[in-house]
Structures are given as C-alpha cells and as structure tokens.
Amino acid sequence: MNKQDFFIPNGIYLLNHSVGCLPRTTAFAKEEFFEMWKLKGGEAWGEWLSLLDGFCHSLATLLNGHPDEFCPQTNLSSAISKILLSLPLRRDRNKILISEMDFPSMGFAISQMKRMGYQLEVIPAKNGRLSLESWKKYLKPDVELALITHVIYGNSFLNRVQDILDYAKAEGIITVVDIAQSVGVVPINLRQWNGDFVIGSCIKWLCGGAGAGFMWVNSEKVTNFQPMDVGWFSHENPFEFEIDNFRYAQTAKRFWGGTPSVLPFAIAKLSIDTINRISVNRIRQHNQRLTQRLIEVAVAQNLKVLTPLDSSQRGGTVVIAFPNPMEAYQRFKEANILIDMRPNFGLRFSPHIYNDEAEIDRILDLLTSDCHLLPIAS
Ligand SMILES: Cc1ncc(COP(=O)(O)O)c(C=O)c1O
C-alpha cells in the first residue's frame, strides 16, 4: 500500500490537495545538499546544477515531455506572470480568458495585465461545471491567451483539456494549463496535449514540498516568447558575462531568471521519482476506488456532493457541502480526520496511495452515525 514509503502525520490524512506527505527518500536530498555545501562551498554549483537538471528529467519522465522543455519556478503565480510578460504583441487580440473557478491567485496575477491594455474575460460556471460549449463560446479570435485549469481546486471538476486545447489552437490562442491539482493523481501526457505552456508545482499530490514549481514550454513554440522577467540563467550562456549582450536561451530556461534556489528542487526530484516508481496510473485507480465509496455513501445520506459523480470528470478530491460546514469540520477534526474547507465550496477529502479502505470506512461510519453531519429529514 506504500504507506511505508512516506511519513504520515497522526490521524487520517486527507489533505493531499494541499500538501502531500513527505516521502522517506527525500531526507537524502537534504543531506546531499548540505554535504556538498559543507565540503565544497561555491564549488558545489556543478553538483547543485545537476540536481536541478535531475528535477527536469524526472518531470519529463512523469509528464512525457523533454527535460529542455521544463524550467524550475517558485510557484504557479510567478510562472504565469513570467508567461504574461513574454507574450508577442498581437494588436487584434486584447483579451485574456480565465474561468470563475480558477484558483484566485491565477486571477490576481492575470488581472495585472489590465494595466497593459488587456481585458479579462471570465467564463462563468454552471452548477460548478464548464461545458465544452461554454469554452467554445469564449475561445474567440480576439483572445490572446487562455488559462485552462485541469482540475478545479474547489470541487475537483476536471476540464476536458485535450478538446479545449485543440479548439484554442485552431483559433490561434496561446494556452496555459494549470496542473497544480492534477499532477501526481491524474495521468498527463504533455506530448499528446501539445499546448503552449503548462504550469504546476510539487507540493500537493507529488509530495515534493513547497517551493518547487515548474513551467513546461512546447519546444516548437518557445522561441515565439520573449520574457521580460529574466536573469543570467535565462541567457543562452549564463557564464558569458557581457552586460550589453543578452541572448535568450533557446529552451524553456529563458524563463528562469537569476541565481536559482536548489534545495526545494532536490527534494522534489526524489519525490517525483517516488511517484514515478509507484505510477500515476496506479495512484489514480486507487484514488478513484476510495473516492467512489465515499461519494456513494454521501449521496445515500442525502448529502450534497459538489464533485462530479462520474469518475472520468473528477480529479482526486471529493468535496461535500454539509448543511452546517463549521460543525461538520469540527466533528471530523475531533475524530482526527484531517481535511479542510473552502468558502463557497465545501469540505475537501483527498485520499492518496497511502490511504486505505479502513480509513475510508472510519469516515463512512461517521457519515452514517453522526446526525449532526446530515441534513434534517423532511
Ligand atoms: C488550481 C490551483 N492553481 C494554483 C495553485 C497555487 O498557486 P501558487 O503555486 O502560486 O501558490 C493552487 C493551490 O491550491 C491550485 O489549487
């Protein structure tokens, strides 16, 4: 069941949509990093850069991309800002498209582009869903860039990314896919998607900790984009040191910047290797088995399940709107079941490979026995 591969906090840990558990192997990354620093000081850069390279290779294996198509980033908000400030000027396209269910931080970053003369267009959701028809209605020739969130943080709705990308491409729209909530729990094939950009991080289902974000840029498109936010690691040859001769790297690394941090990526590299070893397909199947049971019992108890009931339309989380969410949250907390709550949505339950049927049974017991959790029978 792979429980032994992770350090799992006491209780039933279901916060994997927020922070995945620490894999046991990642402790070595810290030791290796400090050891090199201790022994070599500044001469450790060769090894440190290889660790960053390793991070990109592990992502390439996970997501079916090429290592050169990946660029380490601090987080998704910073990655999207860099993309926005790299766009080619196309005067006939002045809209940036997002959906109302995207993660707010993405909207905060994108709305800054209003200062540059862009308009923000927001696709409304219907009952927490975004249909392909809605996407098509908004993917119009005046759109410069569309943000497509693979899995929505509030209700785990899974967008039909391939169909949306194919449609956007036909309209000449630049695409960015946010995989923060899907990477590690939903299989992703970047070659097949063949969009422009993908942004993600390792903190959630990849169990890689904070600070290891990343960007994927399609190698066939990368030279169309000229980021404004650059540094010497964005240079074709970072060690050239000629202040009046900046040349963009020919790969995704043009989005890098100044001296990179190393430790978060060294840690995340080992966690991605752990997830690759387990396999995302297996994690997906296991997650769906557990979430399906939870959903069936919640529905039978007349609870409002906000997550799509059809397993092919959801990510790894089940979101339930309890009649009294604060009280429900408290009850779960007392039972040592670790979950969280998002305003306007509900309580979020996210089982990973290290959760098991017995843990889900404990939740089901609570759902079927604690009248405080349930709607009042009419
Ligand atoms: C869909 C989605 N995008 C992005 C983020 C996080 O963005 P950042 O890495 O900038 O904190 C989250 C975090 O929960 C998320 O759920």
Image (spheres, rainbow, N blue to C red):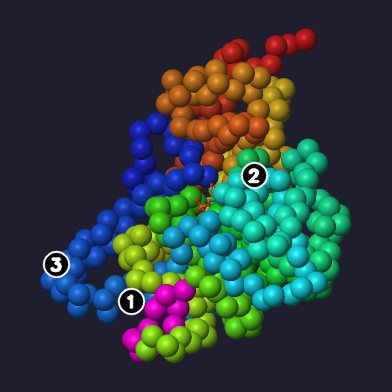
Q: Is residue 37 above or below residue 346?
A: below
Q: Residue 14 versus residue 104: which sits nearer the camera?
A: 104
Mark 1 surroundings: few (<14), some (14-19) or many (≥20) residues within 10 A: few
Residue 295, percent from left and from top: 66, 34
Overall secondary structure of the magenta section? loop
Q: Residues within 10 Å of mark 3 (few under 14, many from 20)?
A: few
Q: Along the line of sight, which residue is nearer the eye, 199 or 369?
A: 199
In the picture, residue 13 is in which quadrant? top left
Q: Is residue 24 left or right of residue 37?
A: right
Indicate yes or no whether the magenta region holds residue 231: yes
Give the distance between the C-alpha atoms of the residues marked 2 and 1, in whole angstroms.
36 Å
Q: Residues within 10 Å of mark 2 (few under 14, many from 20)?
A: many
Residue plotted at (40% across, 53% down) = 210
Q: Which residue is the site of mark 2? A: 156
Residue 274 located left or right of residue 293: left
Point out which mark residue 38 bears.
3
Asked whether disc 2 touches disc 1, contact meaning CB atoms under 8 Å apart, the reply is no
Q: Residue at x 53, y 56 (%)?
A: 77
Query: Amino acid type of disc 2?
Result: Ser
The secondary structure type at the circle numbered 3 is helix
| The quadrant where residue 373 appears | top right
Residue 89 placed where, x, y %?
69, 75
In screen coordinates, is 371 left or right of 118?
A: left
Q: Name the residue that disc number 1 marks.
A: 50
Query: What amino acid is found at the position of numbered circle 3 in the picture?
Result: Lys
The disc at residue 35 is none
Question: Does the numbered disc 2 mark a residue whose Cβ is under 8 Å from ligand 1?
Answer: no
**Residue 241: x percent and y percent?**
34, 87
Within the magenta stretch, is there residue 217?
Answer: no
Give the residue at x 44% y 60%. 74
Which residue range is magenta in the image?
A: 230-241
- The answer to whether residue 65 of the structure is visible from this angle is no
